[in-house]
Image (spheres, rainbow, N blue to C red):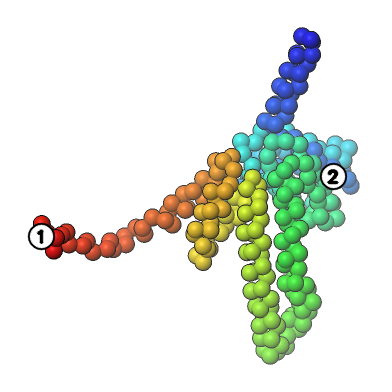
Amino acid sequence: MKKLILLLSAVVILTSCTKDKYTISGTVTGFENGKTVILETQNENGTLIAVDTVKVENGKFEIKGKAIEPSFHTLQVEGAQGKIPFILENGDISIVVNKDSIQKSKVSGTYNNDEYVTFNEEITKVQKKLIDFQTKNMQAMNTAQQTKDTIVINGLMKEFSKIQEEVGVASKAKYVAYAESHPKSFISALIIQGMLNDPSTDLTKSEKLYNGLEESLKNTKPGKAIKTKLAEMKSPSVGATPPAPTQAPTAEGK
């Protein structure tokens, strides 16, 4: 019995340690041994900085560390065109690098990364009409610009603006619906933060979405930024003229 208790205790300790650290397991088929893989993030100035570097060995690499909270990072593989965005968080993260098309690389393994992939797929569907229009009319627009055909240019721009507006409305609806239904997703915190940068955003709606987030998300950098922004938006503007005071009633009630 004592051995069983010790064994269970060891399992609990091992599990808790795993949750407090991250392991990025990468597969990079087609890359030579010795190629450098760089884990990057943005600093406060928006500049990409290296967090860690490893070398490719037999088509694989591994990066280990500890994340204080979820945050966006990128992977840059030497020789690959482009970077792979993902959410760095504690847990086992798997990244399969597509050498021919870095945008088709696959990230999986943790809740927020799985949600990020699914969310991007859904948004791509919403924005497909706009992308299809651009692809279909790119050559026509280039030709019209070269020949200075303003009729064709104006016609295409008018149609593009109409589709762009439709897609914009649909995208916003998708963002709000996602944040409402995913209170523990890091993506939801980023959506709400982005909403507050839009002057037309419904403040009451944004605050309701924020209040619905799990406490762990409220304590992240985006969560704290949302709280600060909401407080600023709800407080009177600095330098605003205060309303004229009303005259106090006299003893006679006048």
Q: Amino acid at mark 2?
A: Val
Query: Up-down: is 198 above or below 33?
Result: below
Residue drawn at the location 56% of the way across and 41% of the way down: 215
Residue 216 is at least partly visible in this image:
yes
Residue 145 is at least partly visible in this image:
no
Image quadrant in which you'd find residue 26:
top right
Q: Secondary structure at mark 2?
A: loop
Q: Report the side of 195 relative to 230 (left or right).
A: right
Query: Up-down: is 204 above or below 50?
Result: below
In percent of width and height, residue 245 lies at 22, 61
Q: Amino acid at mark 1?
A: Glu
Q: Secondary structure at mark 1?
A: loop
Indicate which label's residue lies in the foreground, 1 or 2: 1
In percent of width and height, residue 198 lies at 53, 63
Gap in angstroms between the C-alphas marked 1 and 2: 87 Å
Residue drawn at the location 69% of the way across and 76% of the way down: 163
User: Depth check: 223 or 141 in front?
Assistant: 223
Residue drawn at the location 71% of the way across and 51% of the way down: 116
Image quadrant in which you'd find residue 154:
bottom right
The residue under label 2 is: 28
Q: Quadrant of the N terminus?
A: top right
Identify the disc placed on residue 219: none
User: Depth check: 13 or 47 in front?
Assistant: 13
In percent of width and height, residue 200 lies at 51, 66
Q: Report the side of 183 relative to 53 (left or right).
A: left
Q: Label 1: few (<14), some or many (≥20) within 10 Å?
A: few
In percent of width and height, residue 67 lies at 65, 36
Residue drawn at the location 47% of the way across and 53% of the way down: 230
Identify the mark nearer the N-term, 1 or 2.
Answer: 2
The residue under label 1 is: 252
